[in-house]
Amino acid sequence: MRNRRTRSQRPRHRTSPRRIAVRGYFAKADKTAADLKSSVQRSITFPDLLEKTMADDDTMDLFKVVLLGSFDRMGERIAGTKNDIRISPDFACAQGRITVPTLVVHGTHDPLVPFAEHGKTLSERIPGAKLCLGERGEHTTIFTHRALVKSAVREFLKE
């Protein structure tokens, strides 16, 4: 049996801002994990895709990892994210000069990154790009259309 110290016998640590931030992260992670179903429901609006996605344990495990990962070091990333949003309208990329093999994975109903303005444009402007298009796929297409995406990635990597 382990020797346990009482609270008064434990070494005292000063609570640093970093410790508070770490505790806050894990508190958010616990809350997010507990609220996974609600998060998935907010992300997938088509009832049949929602039901199929939530019934697949492997997909839900992956969704959970991505969701929890989005909180990782959030405080350190927020300034960069705000900057990206600020400069995005003026960002131009010479997509026609991209020479590496490219697979564009996109959903037709992504409310955050509309297909016509992004996925379609990228797949047309990047020479030789392949397009994996999830019909009725939203911002979570890699989850809702997992079999389609896995197949497309597998084929893409064979080439």
Image (cartoon, rainbow, N blue to C red):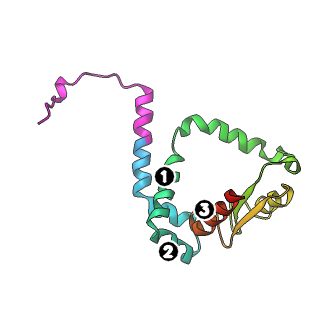
Q: Which is more N-terminal, label 1 or label 3?
A: 1
Element class at badge 3: helix
Q: Position of residue 141 (x, y in %)?
A: 62, 64
Q: Quadrant of the C terminus?
A: bottom right
Q: Amino acid at mark 1?
A: Val
Say which residue label 2 marks: 51
Mark 1 residue crowding within 10 angstroms, few (<14) / some (14–19) / many (20+): few
Question: Residue at position x 17%, y 23% from top?
Answer: 9
For disc 3, the neighbor class at 10 Å (few under 14, some 14 to 19, many from 20) is many
Magenta residues span 1-25
Classed neighbour count for the residue bearing mark 2: other residues with Cα under 10 Å, few (<14), some (14–19), many (≥20): few
Image: 38 above or below 93: below
Residue at 66% of width from left, 37% of height from top? 80
Tally the numbered discs. Answer: 3
Q: In the drawing, what numbered circle is on residue 2?
A: none
Which is nearer the eye, 37 or 57?
57
Where is residue 83 drawn, in percent x and y? 71, 38
49 part of magenta stretch: no
The residue identified by callout 3 is: 142
Is the residue under label 1 in contact with that under label 3 (CB below 8 Å)? no
Q: Earlier in the sequence, mark 1 or mark 2?
A: 2
| Image quadrant where residue 33 sits | bottom left
**3D distance between C-alphas at marks 3 and 2:** 15 Å
- Where is residue 143? Give x, y as percent: 56, 63
Q: Cβ–Cβ below 8 Å for labels 1 and 2?
A: no
Between tags 3 and 2, which lies in front?
A: 3
Residue in view at x 55 percent, y 77 percent:
48
